[in-house]
Amino acid sequence: MIIDGFDRKILATLLENGVATQAELGEAANLSGPAAGRRQRQLQEKGLIKGYHAELDFGRFGFGVLVMVLIQLERQSQETLAAFERAVALCPSVMSCHLLSGGEDYLITLRARDLPDFERIHRTELSELPGVVRMQSLFTLREVVSRAAPPALLAPLP
């Protein structure tokens, strides 16, 4: 799908400020507010904008520990994958789960209050997931880059 420079500026503004007004979008894209609003609606209707989300400060909520967990399943049958995916979707601590290629099967991202909280999550949520034979937990020391989208996504085509 082709988007023009006006759309790119609108999208870039929304990535920085998801609650930008039509006037702010118009100013960023050198359009009138209503014209920018129409373009925003068209981008939503075309499915280029899936939704809007608040960016939370997890540390302020007491969830300062970011953990990534690599999961290996006993087998990769459709039945095993489906059972795992159904169960992980019900885990209240899981933020995201991705099916991987390579040696591990899934990557789970979650937030915990501290190490004892992660130990509880490991014991009561992760270790109960069906088909798991191995887990490797990776603790984030510091977040270096976190973006809603890579800048290259909105770069003009060469």
Image: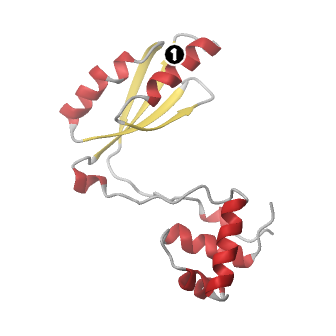
Residue 141: where, in percent of width, then height? Answer: 32, 47
In percent of the image, x 45 and y 14: which residue is there?
Answer: 130
Which quarter of the figure has residue 35?
A: bottom right
In percent of the image, x 31 and y 58: which residue is there?
Answer: 57
Please state the total of marks drawn on the protein image.
1
Residue 65: where, in percent of width, then height? Answer: 28, 44
Which quarter of the figure has residue 39?
A: bottom right
In the rendered image of this protein, does residue 88 appear above or below residue 50?
above
Q: Which of 135 and 127 is in front in this view?
A: 127
- Position of residue 36 in the picture relative to residue 69 (left or right): right
- Position of residue 135 in the picture relative to residue 24 (left or right): left
- Position of residue 57 in the picture relative to residue 36 (left or right): left
Residue 15: where, in percent of width, then height? Answer: 54, 67
Residue at the disc numbered 1: 73
- Give SS at disc 1: strand
Residue 24: where, in percent of width, then height? Answer: 54, 83
Residue with the most extreme left position: 116
In percent of the image, x 63 and y 12: which residue is there?
Answer: 77
- Position of residue 101 in the picture relative to residue 69 (left or right): right
Image quarter of the C terminus: bottom right
In the rendered image of this protein, does residue 22 appear above or below residue 129?
below
For label 1, the crowd category at 10 Å Cα-Cα, with few meaning under 14, some 14 to 19 and many 20 or more, is some
In percent of the image, x 74 and y 71: which residue is there?
Answer: 156
Q: Which colour scheme is used?
A: secondary structure
Image quarter of the N terminus: bottom right
Q: What residue type is labelled 1?
A: Leu
